[in-house]
Image: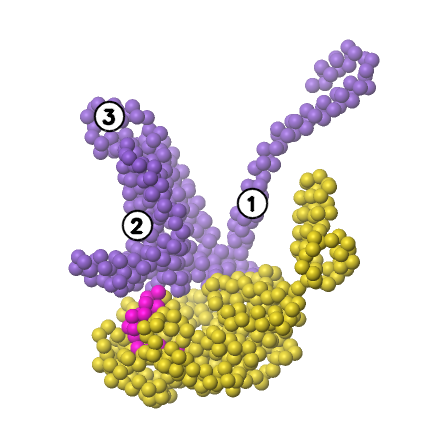
């Protein structure tokens, strides 16, 4: 770096002062340019990280800290160290296990049908059909609806009396009215129905996007080999979609683990117990009940961190499955 | 003296417009932070310079804006009390911040109180939460008992006591109360062969909840198809709980809900109502409950004065003169609120004056007249607005007299910090199961106790 500038001053020694100033200016400018290139990107992405630190990382760490204390909502600054007691008491907390079980079953009966239906819908939408844009927008509308509005409608549909739409329909085919909210399984089915309704279209669009990236030749050659539509779907579409399917599985699992709004509103906001027998109380709802209803922030924090650890576990599992799929493919 | 903060920041940023843009941004941030940090007191040196900088013809002298935080449709604004106070005090502006549900309002208020920020000048508190304030947060609230114009003897003794902390600091002034009566449908009573006159109906069960059950059995024997005697078992339970001299806590503040006689009586009676099929199996304040009012599918409901308007709304014009109100077997209190003034507020003195005015007997009588919120100031009961009040929807029932009598019969009942939680769990994870699912009362009791113990255990 120093060498060429030295040689130039040697060639023209007369305006040495000016050149030296020039030199300095140029050096400054190039330094500024280098800094600009090197640091500007950091400045540009900084807002996200600052926000993440303020609203993501700090709450996460603070929740972890709070989970090791006895903290009450009435006096959040008054913290008493209890070590891992908030976690250990979860082990024999029936309500926690009940909520975990409910989260799992509701997650299962909502995610599996939802993804299968989304796959089917995407396949249908992938055909050449008139007004396809309309249908694509239409299947996304449930996703754009607010949980509150949707759930209120579903509550009316799943009403206990004969006035409820679903019981009325059942009555037409001679089945007695079902007390949806009070039955263990019926309540979970009803909550799942809301989730399925809301998220199927969203997943279908993701599948559709991935399907359209599949080269058309594959279908043509499959058709030449005499494969039916169904066989094409099974042997061309699904294998090509594997990474996408894995992605939607992960996203849906995370969503199911954090399920909160639907069960809360399904009891019409009466209380966060998820029914008189806690029959549809999810982990998210139990966390909310402990923190904001029973006012035990420390215990709620412990539940929040347990949920976080469960999600980390799911993430690891998914990573392992993903690797296994790549290897086998 | 009372230059608003926003105007000050405005002046300051404009002063810097000639400096480069980044400096303006920094100045704006600094001015905002400065404006937020400096209190009103420090503004007093401003008027001299403020005049010369010419604020662009702002509205003359500044006003003090008092904010009032309430939950639900509290009624003070709707009854025109804010407007009246502003007329009486031209230098005061009143702004109300309303949160729809107390379940959302209360936790936020608690956190704001302990951090000393985000508070309104006046904060309303529901009766179910007031014991938590007098128990653990009295030092964060202004002692309103010492405010000029507040007269302890004007209030019902038990209501005054509820807002008073151990050291004798009255931190919450009572607004309304909810002495209970029984609202009943005359047409259904007639079809079932029961008396319909409100005095006779009151005599049917006077003094004893068991008689209420027996009236229900008589009703059921001849009741029209598809109608029940009461709305739901949880409502009966709550009414019995409210009418005892001891509920969940004893006078020393010890938790006694498992052995309290009133709790046991309420539980057993409500379970008998459910098992005898006298209930419409409804949960109160749910859409299906509203619908049942419209369809006339139950005959009686425990009703404090504030519920009369609710019934009128839901039952509609068709049911006019079908509903009437009689005395409850034993009166209790259901609902009611308080006003508090946080110590962290900027305008404590003005806020205390406003709170005292809003809860004075005359204003309470007006609130009753406009919004059917029943006065907690017994001095208001002799005012014509209360004494002569009749409800045209309820067959011209003299509601002022009926509920005054009930209010004076409400027992002095200790309330504790977790009253709200306990009563909600007893209903939602206990009696509701007995009523709606047919769970055995013993099993439901065990479940409710387990939920409550888990909730109260820190």
The quarter in which the N terminus of chain A is drawn is top right
Q: Quadrant of residue B224?
A: bottom left
Left or right for A33, reference A101: right
Q: Secondary structure at mark 1?
A: helix
Compare residues B112 and B155 and report the one nearer the observer: B155
According to the rendering, which colour does chain B have? yellow
Q: Is residue A160 above or below residue B56?
A: below
Q: Position of residue B409 (x, y in %)?
A: 45, 86
Q: Verify CB contact (< 8 Å) between mark 3 and mark 1.
A: no
Residue position for label 2: A109
Residue position for label 3: A222
Do callouts 3 and 2 point to residues on the same chain? yes
Left or right for B204, reference B57: left
Q: Report the residue at 46% width, 76% height from top.
A: B372
Q: Which residues are magenta?
A: B287-303
Q: Position of residue B443 (x, y in %)?
A: 31, 70
Q: Report the residue at 31% width, 85% height from top.
A: B196
Q: Report the residue at 32% width, 70% height from top.
A: B294
Q: Report the residue at 63% width, 73% height from top.
A: B88
Q: Position of residue B432 (x, y in %)?
A: 33, 69
Using the image, name the chain to which the residue with label 3 belongs: A
Instruction: Please rate how many residues cluster around mark 2, counting C-alpha atoms within 10 Å: few if below 14, some from 14 to 19, many from 20.
Output: some
Q: Which chain is purple?
A: A
**Residue A156 shows in this picture:** yes
CA distance for labels 3 and 2: 34 Å
Instruction: Please rate how many residues cluster around mark 1, counting C-alpha atoms within 10 Å: few if below 14, some from 14 to 19, many from 20.
Output: few
Marks 3 and 2, the one that precedes in the sequence: 2
Query: Which mark identifies residue A173?
Result: none
CA distance for labels 1 and 2: 36 Å
Compare residues A285 and A328 and report the one nearer the observer: A285
Q: Quadrant of residue B144?
A: bottom right
Residue position for label 1: A51
């Amino acid at each position: 770096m120093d060498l060429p500038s030295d040689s130039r001053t040697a060639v023209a020694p007369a305006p040495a002062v000016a050149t030296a100033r020039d030199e300095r200016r140029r050096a400054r400018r190039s330094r500024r340019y280098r800094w600009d290139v090197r640091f500007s990107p950091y400045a540009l992405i900084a807002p996200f990280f600052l926000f993440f630190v303020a609203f993501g990382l700090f709450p996460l760490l603070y929740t972890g800290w709070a989970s090791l204390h006895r903290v009450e909502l009435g006096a959040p600054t008054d913290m008493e160290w209890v070590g891992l007691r908030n976690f250990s008491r979860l082990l024999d907390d029936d309500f926690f296990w009940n909520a975990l079980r409910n989260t799992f079953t509701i997650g299962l009966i909502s995610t599996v049908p939802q993804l299968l239906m989304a796959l089917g819908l995407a396949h249908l939408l992938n055909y050449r059909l008139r007004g396809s844009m309309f249908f694509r927008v239409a299947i996304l509308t449930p996703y754009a609806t607010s949980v509150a509005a949707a759930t209120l409608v579903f509550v009316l549909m799943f009403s206990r009396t004969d006035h409820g739409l679903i019981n009325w329909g059942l009555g037409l085919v001679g089945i007695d009215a079902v007390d949806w909210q009070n039955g263990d399984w019926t309540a979970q089915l009803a909550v799942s129905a809301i989730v399925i309704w809301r998220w199927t279209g969203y997943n279908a669009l993701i599948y559709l996007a991935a399907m359209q990236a599949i080269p058309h030749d594959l279908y043509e050659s499959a058709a030449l080999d005499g494969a039916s539509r169904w066989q094409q779907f099974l042997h061309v579409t699904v294998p090509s979609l594997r990474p996408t399917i894995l992605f939607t599985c992960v996203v849906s699992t995370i969503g199911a683990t954090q399920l909160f709004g639907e069960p809360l509103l399904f009891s019409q906001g009466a209380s966060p117990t998820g029914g008189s027998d806690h029959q549809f109380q999810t982990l998210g709802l139990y966390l909310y009940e402990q923190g904001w209803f029973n006012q035990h922030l420390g215990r709620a924090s412990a539940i929040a961190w347990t949920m976080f650890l469960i999600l980390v576990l799911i993430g690891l599992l998914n990573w392992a499955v993903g690797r296994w799929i790549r290897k086998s493919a | 003296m009372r230059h608003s903060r926003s105007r000050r920041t405005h002046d300051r940023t404009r002063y810097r417009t000639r400096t480069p843009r980044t400096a303006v941004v920094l100045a704006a941030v600094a001015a905002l932070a400065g404006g937020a940090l400096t209190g009103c007191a420090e503004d007093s040196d401003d008027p001299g310079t403020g005049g010369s900088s010419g604020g662009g013809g702002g509205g003359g002298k500044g006003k003090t804006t008092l904010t009032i935080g309430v939950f639900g449709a509290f009624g003070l604004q709707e009854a025109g009390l804010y407007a009246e106070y502003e007329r009486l005090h031209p230098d005061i502006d009143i702004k109300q911040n309303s949160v729809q549900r107390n379940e959302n309002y209360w936790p936020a208020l608690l956190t704001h109180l302990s951090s000393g920020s985000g508070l309104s000048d006046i904060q309303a508190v529901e009766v179910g939460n007031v014991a938590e304030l007098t128990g653990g947060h009295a030092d964060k609230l202004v002692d309103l008992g010492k405010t000029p114009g507040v007269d302890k003897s004007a209030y019902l003794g038990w209501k005054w006591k509820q807002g008073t902390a151990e050291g004798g600091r009255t931190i919450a002034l009572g607004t309304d109360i909810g002495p209970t009566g029984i609202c009943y449908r005359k047409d259904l009573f007639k079809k079932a062969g029961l008396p319909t006159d409100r005095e006779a109906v009151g005599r049917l069960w006077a003094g004893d909840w068991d008689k209420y059950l027996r009236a229900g059995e008589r009703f059921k024997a001849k009741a029209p198809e598809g109608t029940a005697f009461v709305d739901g078992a949880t409502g009966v339970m709550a009414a019995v709980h409210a009418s005892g001299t001891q509920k969940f806590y004893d006078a020393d503040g010890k938790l006694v809900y498992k052995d309290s006689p009133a709790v046991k009586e309420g539980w057993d009676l409500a379970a008998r109502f459910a098992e005898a099929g006298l209930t419409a199996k409804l949960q109160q304040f749910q859409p299906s409950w509203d619908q049942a009012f419209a369809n006339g599918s139950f005959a009686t409901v425990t009703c404090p004065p504030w519920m009369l308007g609710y019934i009128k709304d839901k039952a509609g014009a068709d049911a006019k003169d079908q509903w009437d109100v009689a005395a409850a077997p034993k009166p209790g209190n259901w609902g009611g609120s308080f006003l508090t003034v946080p110590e962290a507020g900027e305008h404590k003195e003005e806020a205390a004056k406003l709170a005292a005015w809003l809860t004075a007997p005359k204003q309470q009588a007006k609130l009753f007249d406009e919004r059917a919120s029943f006065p907690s100031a017994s001095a208001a009961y002799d005012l014509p607005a209360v004494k002569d009040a009749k409800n045209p929807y309820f067959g011209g029932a003299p509601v002022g007299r009926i509920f005054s009598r009930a209010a004076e019969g409400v027992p002095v009942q200790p309330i504790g910090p977790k009253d709200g939680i306990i009563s909600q769990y007893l209903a939602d994870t206990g009696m509701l199961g007995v009523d709606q699912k047919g769970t055995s009362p013993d099993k439901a009791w065990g479940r409710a106790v387990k939920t409550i113990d888990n909730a109260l255990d820190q």
